Image (tube, rainbow, N blue to C red):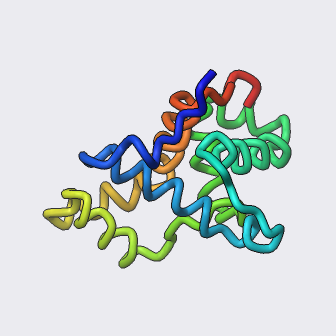
Amino acid sequence: MEKFNLSERVKNGKQGTQFVYVLECINNSSSAYDQGLEFENDLQRVSFVLDSFKKSDYPDNKKRIPNLRDRLGDWLSGLPGQIAIDYENYKIISIGQSWGYCQTESKKDQFLDNWFSMVALRLLQIAEKVGYNTFNL
């Protein structure tokens, strides 16, 4: 199977911009830096984050939060070192505005409320595109 490098192939559109943001956040993570990791492709990036999620996700979480996207978003809201996503409201709103969201105060609030869930969704979508098996997460 050919390695699918999403950051090389997706350049345009909101979703593509969001994919690139998530992948860059993995590249810029403190854990990757501390371990001296240089990722060769997007599968390695996704594996780095989702394997860490799998190891840290204790069994009771599946009962408390059965939906994978919600569970991953909850984990991301704890700011794991494997992905350097923005967490300050003003930065998140700025990102939302650059992506074409956040035109009104209510849209800003909605974007903030859904931030970690949206990042989780994009991460899972990237995982599917690069062939990472999320079945056992």
Residue at 30% of width from left, 73% of height from top? 94
Furthest residue in direction left, as rendered: 103
Q: Height in image: 1 above or below 8? A: above
Q: Nearer the viewer, residue 105 or 32?
A: 32
Q: Height in image: 29 above or below 113? A: below
Horizontal side, residue 133 vs residue 59: left or right: left
Q: Height in image: 51 above or below 113? A: above
Residue 16 % position (x, y):
34, 46
Count of numbered circles in the view: 0
Give the position of the C terminus as an image quadrant: top right
Residue 116 % position (x, y):
50, 54
Furthest residue in direction front, as rendered: 2
Q: Height in image: 65 above or below 72? A: above
Give the position of the N terminus as an image quadrant: top right
Horizontal side, residue 13 vs residue 122: left or right: left
Residue 80 % position (x, y):
70, 62
Residue 5 % position (x, y):
52, 41
Residue at 60% of width from left, 69% of height from top? 28
Q: Quadrant of residue 78?
A: bottom right
Horizontal side, residue 37 vs residue 43: left or right: right
Residue at 64% of width from left, 40% of height from top? 43
